[in-house]
Image (cartoon, rainbow, N blue to C red):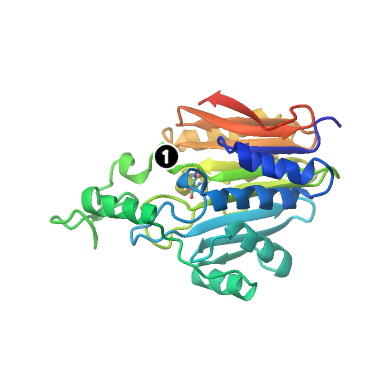
Amino acid sequence: DKYIPLVVTTWDYKNATEVAWNTIYNGKGSAIDAIEAGCSFCEEIQCRGTVGYGGSPDENGETTLDAMLMDGTTMDVGAVGGIRNVKSAISVARHVLENTAHSLLVGDLATEFAIKMGFSNESLQTDKSHGLWKKWKNNHCQPNFWKNVTPNPTTNCGPYQPKRKTKYPDKFMHSNEDNHDTIGMLAIDAKGQIAAGTSTNGARNKIPGRVGDSPIAGAGAYADQEVGAAAATGDGDIMMRFLPSFLTVELMRQGMTPTTAAETAIKRIVKHYPNFSGAVIALNKNGRFGVACNGFKGFPFYASNLKLGKPTIFYVPC
Ligand code: SD4
């Protein structure tokens, strides 16, 4: 089929798409290899500051990483949530996939696992992430991700007092567009094997311990050989409540095109959260792909197959 192999990537991650494409187009690498390579590339170059180390510091100034790989052939998942002090989150996820019977490891204990697997333990803080954190702490220390609490009146920061009945307006619950650039990647290799993956440093100024949608199967990404795959990016705190990647794959199973399936999954969220920001990319086993988004000005994504050749950008208004 002229549409296979295929790689589809969220946002304008051209080089990451190219790395993934180069892994599979000559038939050498698997879909999983392609996704690991593409996401690793983004982790190393710190794509838009929202993938890899040195981005999205939490309230304590620490960067933690979420990543997932799902193999649609074996229906096996490997993921890490809130992993600390390890840069290669997607590769740790691959070790969870291949070397354990588990699907998701979190926090410090995910770090311990990574170290046993030979990864190095190094700080994820950079001058840039420290600067972002300091600026937030000094100037805008509003409780972005808290609800029903009042900040300390002098500092406008924590510790927060529970204050039942009042809700912070939505703008404090959601972060802005710059904060939503998770790499989500879908691939079909030359053998027709389908995989999906994600890697992100999550949401800026998050409450320490927060894990987003990206490492959750069915939320951040999902793949099923019999149907296709999907991945999500955006406000993970909201999106993970709807398992949009799973829903998109299920709707394709029922016969929808990738675009209609992704649109339907996005609309399900809009019904409850009209202003949420997010996008879903999808592909089916025949090599068709599509996207839907909400709340962004527009949404760019890259695809590469034998017909398109080099990674090609697509842009949809939301
Ligand atoms: C998260 N979904 O942790 C991620 C952020 C994101 O594009 O997608 N950015 O909520």
Quadrant placement of the N terminus: top right
Viewer-nearest residue: 219 or 85? 85
Residue at 71% over, 39% down: 7
Q: Is residue 226 above or below residue 110?
A: above
Q: Is residue 243 left or right of residue 149?
A: right
Q: Position of residue 195 (x, y in %)?
A: 72, 48
Say which element carries label 1. helix
Q: Is residue 150 left or right of residue 289?
A: left
Q: Position of residue 138 (x, y in %)?
A: 22, 53
Q: Mark 1 sits on what residue?
A: 178
Q: Position of residue 95 (x, y in %)?
A: 68, 65
Residue labelled 1 has its Cβ within 8 Å of some atom of ligand 1: no
Quadrant hosting residue 24: top right
Residue at 58% over, 46% down: 243
Q: Is residue 6 visible?
A: yes
Q: Position of residue 102 (x, y in %)?
A: 66, 67
